[in-house]
Image (cartoon, rainbow, N blue to C red):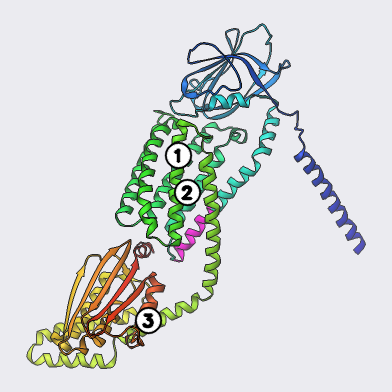
Amino acid sequence: MKKSKINVSLYIVMFLFAGFAVFWACRNSGQATMAILVPLGFEGEYSQNGGPWQSLSESNNFSAYDGDLVLRGKIDPELPEGALLNFYLDHIGISIYLNGQVIYESSFEKYPDMCGKVWASWDYYDVTAEDVFEIRLHNPHSYGNKDAYNEFLDSVCMGGGEVLKYYYDKQTLPYRSFCVFIIVASIALIGSACGYQLLRLPGSTLLSKLGIMSLLMGAYMYFDVKDIQLKSDRVVLNTYGCQLAIMLAAWMLVAGVAELLHEKRRKIAEIAGYVLMAADFIFIAISLADVIWIYDTGIYWAIIQGTISAILIILCIPEVKNSGKQERFLLVSAVVLLAVLIAELLNARMFWWHSGNCMKAVFSVLFVLLLIKAAWAVAKNYQNSISAQKLREELKNSRVILAMSQIRTHFIFNILNAISGMCAYDPRKADETLVMFSRYLRSNINIMDEDEPETFTKSLEHLEDYIQLEQVRFGEKIKFEKIIEEEDFMIPPLVLQPVTENAIKHGLLHKKEGGTIRLHTWRENGNNIIEISDDGAGFDTSAAPKEGAVGMKNVRFRLEYMVGGTMDVKSIPGEGTTVTITIPKTVKDEVKKR
């Protein structure tokens, strides 16, 4: 029984191996289904835009912008009767004449939907050496492929349609496979962005824009190939797919750059993105209304896109200096892509290299680098996830500890005693203080159940309640001043109060006359800054810190892990202490999206 199973397995393996051998031999053979492609040339003379007839040579370089091109002569080498000629038309039309009579025509004036990248063929019949054989090439666009006439001349060949398809299949397989890889990887990036959004992780918006841009670039690269019509004979789909993919990819690039900028520069970039979006919408709308072909909107789109790209480069350069490593890589990549995009738009007129090649190469390199960095980040996040549960528990414990530290028994007794004393001589003030005290206690209790940052405005209201309660106890010894230049940002609960309490307890109350606490907020380099200073006793920062008394270590911990913030403490004995809290501006945007 065992021997029988072994024999069957051997037969299967042998047949599979034989089948693979046949496939591999056919795949790597130079022989196609019917024959091999035979490159052909054209001997004779030419006239462009009605000019004089000139001798045709291999050194001729024709521009499709210089008018119609007429070739007169013969195909080289001489063709057998009934041979099938293949030739490539990139947004140009062709008419073939024999003794002044049209024997073949592909006119985009008659068939505008066929305007695109097309492989056409014609059966070579009844042409003798005495006949006058002419080929007329016409560019129907004011903006198009400048090198289209040269591409036509280089593409003329003899061979069946299956032979042509097989030839380009073999030539473009690695490139097409890479395009598919970009598309699949981009879909994975978009999926990761959705996961970030569900997990409420920062960077989901930027990651989604990068994913969509990469997906569109992958589609553009796939459509922008010489043999696309051999894969899909829907010329309209191929043309619109290629043109709209690059337009929308460039728009998503602009939108992504806006995510990396801050303050006024970000607002300018966002406005530029809206302008580009409106322009793209108009171009698509007028092309659908048959006012103009989508291909012919390219010149106008190039002017708008080039101008916006130049503006964004100017906006990005100052940001690179003040950004972190991750943002710096993305900003530099964006500047490079924008610069290459401008060069490609200029190249469409100058034709320094084959259109699109530079953009494809640079994008491909940057995309691979981005994937490597993303893979590294995933590995790092996986390691961090091992301690994520422990971190959540620590955050929860720190929240409870901070909240409880603000409602200590002696603090409650002191406030209640002060309220009791007011009842005899100022009942109204006693009532106001009692309302304030109850609001303060309720806020601290609610904070125990809060896992998210809160608005700075809400945190400031809680701080002011606390300071007024302390002023009830200590009177004029505690003064409070505030300068609020920026308040539209998020902050972890119970950050302002512990820092202020530390200033009162270890600063102002150590001076007989007391002192002043100053709160100042502003925005700097895209970050939100909170400065809490006092003119109290100060302390020696080189000595053992006094943070544990009112939870300053917890404050620093919550700032770092809830909003990516930092806290810096500077103090001079006898002069006072300054605490500077820095919160990245992106925190506000990410929390609002949750």
Q: Nearer the viewer, mark 2 or mark 3?
A: 3
Along the polypeptide, which appears first: circle 2 or circle 1? 2
Along the polypeptide, which appears first: circle 2 or circle 3? 2
Instruction: Residue at 62%, 46% (x, y): give it.
Output: 177
Along the polypeptide, which appears first: circle 1 or circle 3? 1
Please tell me whether residue 112 belongs to the stretch shown in magenta.
Answer: no
Looking at the picture, how far across and down is residue 568, in whole percent?
33, 75
* Label of residue 476 in the image: none
Circle 1: residue type: Ala
Q: Quadrant of residue 205?
A: bottom left
In the rendered image, which residue does mark 3 sit on?
554
**Which quarter of the rendered picture does the N terminus lie within?**
bottom right
Label 1 to label 3: alpha-carbon separation: 52 Å
Question: Which residues make up the magenta segment?
Answer: 186-199
Instruction: Residue at 79%, 41% (x, y): give it.
Output: 25
Q: Tell me if 172 is positioned left or right of 12 in this view.
A: left
**Which quarter of the rendered picture does the C terminus lie within?**
bottom left
Please rate how many residues cluster around mark 1, counting C-alpha atoms within 10 Å: few if below 14, some from 14 to 19, many from 20: some
- Along the viewing direction, whichever of 561 and 412 lies nearer the viewer: 561
Regarding mark 2 in the picture, which secondary structure is present there?
Answer: helix
| Mark 1 vs 3: CB contact within 8 A | no
Q: Tell me if 355 is positioned left or right of 27 in this view.
A: left
* Label of residue 343 in the image: 1
